[in-house]
Amino acid sequence: MAENVQLINCSFPSEALLYLAYMPFVKGGGLFLRTNHVYPLGKELQLSLKLINEVEPYQINARVVWITPKCSQGNKPTGIGVQFIGENSRYLCNKIETYLAGMLKSTQLTDTI
């Protein structure tokens, strides 16, 4: 990963917020991050990701794979979807799916679909 990688701090303090952001259809796992900042597709980022009640954030590399612009159809929030990349990606994806175990088959809409 390049030296000029931007660090983004993000927090998901509840299962409901994590569910809205989780992107299970992204290979290796991913999250939607609400932001007004414009990132190009393919941009690599570093996330400092705090989940639910965990004290220490996870450090994970990510790549922008989804963009929802302002004023998108369906009143979806503005932001980016990131794909986890690197050695910790599978572990983090499994951790998120453990938190969301009872919600993954829900028909409730998310921030992306």
Image (cartoon, rainbow, N blue to C red):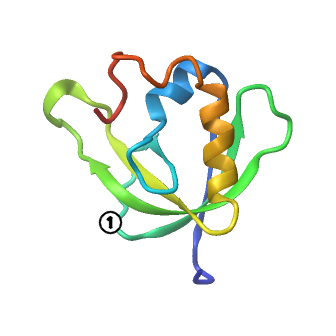
Residue in view at x 62 percent, y 69 percent? 86
Name the residue tied to disc 1. 41
The picture places residue 104, in percent across and down from the top left corner, at 48, 25
Quarter that holds the N terminus: bottom right
**Position of 52 relative to 38 (above/below):** above
Question: Is residue 29 left or right of 12 when viewed as pictured?
Answer: left
Q: Residue at x 44, y 56 (%)?
A: 27
Within 10 Å of disc 1 (Cα), the crowding (few <14, some 14-19, many 20+) is some
User: 79 or 63: nearer the eye?
Assistant: 63
Against 109, residue 40 (above or below) is below
Q: Position of residue 20 (x, y in %)?
A: 45, 27
Tell me where residue 65 appears, x and y as whole percent: 36, 59
Inspect this view and state whether residue 54 appears: yes
Residue 47 visible to an observer of this rendering: no
Q: In the picture, residue 99 is in which quadrant?
A: top right
| Amino acid type, callout 1 | Leu
In the image, is residue 97 above or below residue 57?
A: above
Q: Is residue 55 left or right of residue 46?
A: right
| Picture residue at 42% right of the left edge, 70% below the top | 43
Residue 9's x, y, as percent?
Answer: 64, 48
Residue 81 position (above or below residue 108): below
Nearer to me, 27 or 12: 27
Q: Going 17% across and 37% down the picture, which residue do you hit?
A: 72
Task: Count the marks.
Answer: 1
Question: Outermost residue toward the right?
Answer: 55
Farthest residue toward the bottom? 2
Q: Quadrant of the C terminus?
A: top left
- Secondary structure category for the residue under label 1: loop
